[in-house]
Image: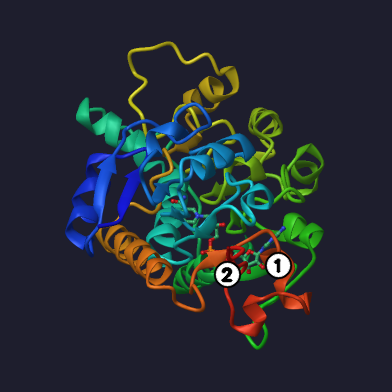
Amino acid sequence: MKKLAFFDTKPYDKLWFDRANTGYEIVYFETKLTARTARLAAGCDAVCAFVNDTIDAAAIDILYECGVKVLALRCAGYNNVDRKAAYGKLVIVRVPAYSPHAVAEHAMALLLCLNRKVHKAYIRTRDFNFSLVGLGGMDLYGKTVGVIGTGKIGRVFIDICRGFGMQVLAYDPYPAADSGLDYVTLDELLERSDVISLHCPLTKENRHLLDGDAFAKMKKGVFLINTSRGGLVDSEALLEALNSGAVRGAGLDVYEEEADLFFEDNSDIPVLDETLSLLVSRPNVIMTSHQAFLTEEALADIARTTFMNLDEYFSDAPVLTNEICYHCDRRKSDPDCLRNRRERCWQPIKD
Ligand code: NAI
């Protein structure tokens, strides 16, 4: 029986992975996967990791020394993995799609709550304060939403926004062919949108895509929604934009320094991150702790796809459906990419 070391386990992970298990011995660890904890995987054939595990070159070398063969990410994003360091040592598989509806619906939930101040009204009415003063919002109907990243989640979010009668502008360096979307430059999107929602991955190139310069270009009073990755937004610049009124409100499911805080109950310890403290204390900021994916459908999909990925690997399938490597970003333009030839990203050297 193959053995799987499962890091950063939460009760809901265990529930859905135990249900979907196709025959692995799973060792659950609550700790995150880092170079300091990687040795816990000794004796395991595979590890399963999540968004805030730190799978850098040091962690990869330890996993490799311990005999781990495959890293199964139970998420879509892989910015926390040093894919170059893993090449030739650890096969990486991921879950590229799991209910894009879960994330897109959460993005709209943040926008609706923020715009109509539902979070404030909830607290007021519990205290029998039925005043409406300060609870005004705007119609979303007829407003312009700028969607950055038009992949699976971005497209579902666009459909939802169209249902509200919003005009949609899109920016994506790789526009979807025949989508009929109104693609514009990033600058034009920033200048014309009443709401901006991020749906692109975090890469080395787009860190702080929304920085002080970008906020300066935005329409005054824009709403910002980020359900993608915290590193896409310069949080200090966002705070300044909120302070000046340039940004009317922000709905944030992610935060650039979330790794040591999110998914945990930190209510008993002082959180020393001043930017985070200032953001969460603002009445026009709603922060959720990377929960956009958290629906029953998504959790079931994640577990099912993770086991499918592992089953493919251990049954020596010639191609791994959801494998990634550091060449993958330029796959479309790379004639040497093995996946384009319907092979695995790399093959271990045979003795
Ligand atoms: P996807 O791969 O289907 O689409 C991503 C799109 O972003 C692609 O069309 C790509 O061309 C585009 N893109 C790449 N670089 C860009 C850039 N610099 N500017 C604008 N667009 C760019 O990915 P999917 O499934 O739609 O997910 C999007 C992101 O959502 C993920 O990368 C992840 O960071 C985030 N996510 C967040 C979750 C949460 O619980 N908060 C859960 C799942 C994903």
Question: Taking the image as drawn, is residue 55 in sight?
Answer: no
Q: How is the image coloured?
A: rainbow
Horizontal and vertical percent position of residue 23: 22, 62
The quadrant of the picture occupied by the C terminus is bottom right
Say the numbered circle drawn on residue 172: 1
Q: Amino acid at mark 2?
A: Gly
Horizontal and vertical percent position of residue 270: 43, 11
SS at mark 2 in the image:
loop
- Nearest the viewer among 344 and 173 is 344
Name the residue beneath numbered marker 2: 151
Task: Name the residue located 60 percent from the left edge and 67 percent from the top edge.
Answer: 347
- Nearest the viewer among 33 and 109 is 33
From the Cβ of disc 1, is ligand 1 less than 8 Å away? yes
Task: Name the residue located 37 percent from the left edge and 21 percent from the top edge.
Answer: 266
Task: Give the quarter of the image for residue 124.
Answer: top left
Horizontal and vertical percent position of residue 144: 62, 64
Q: Amino acid at mark 1?
A: Asp
Query: Please, is residue 261 above or below residue 105 in the view?
Result: above
Query: Please, is residue 251 above or below residue 72 in the view?
Result: above
From the Cβ of disc 2, is ligand 1 less than 8 Å away? yes
Mark 1–mark 2 CB contact (< 8 Å): yes
Say the numbered circle drawn on residue 89: none
* Mark 2 crowdedness (10 Å alpha carbons): few <14, some 14-19, many ≥20: some
Mark positioned earlier in the residue sequence (1 or 2): 2
Task: Name the residue located 34 percent from the left edge and 44 percent from the top edge.
Answer: 6
Query: In this rendering, would 141 be left or right of 341?
Result: left
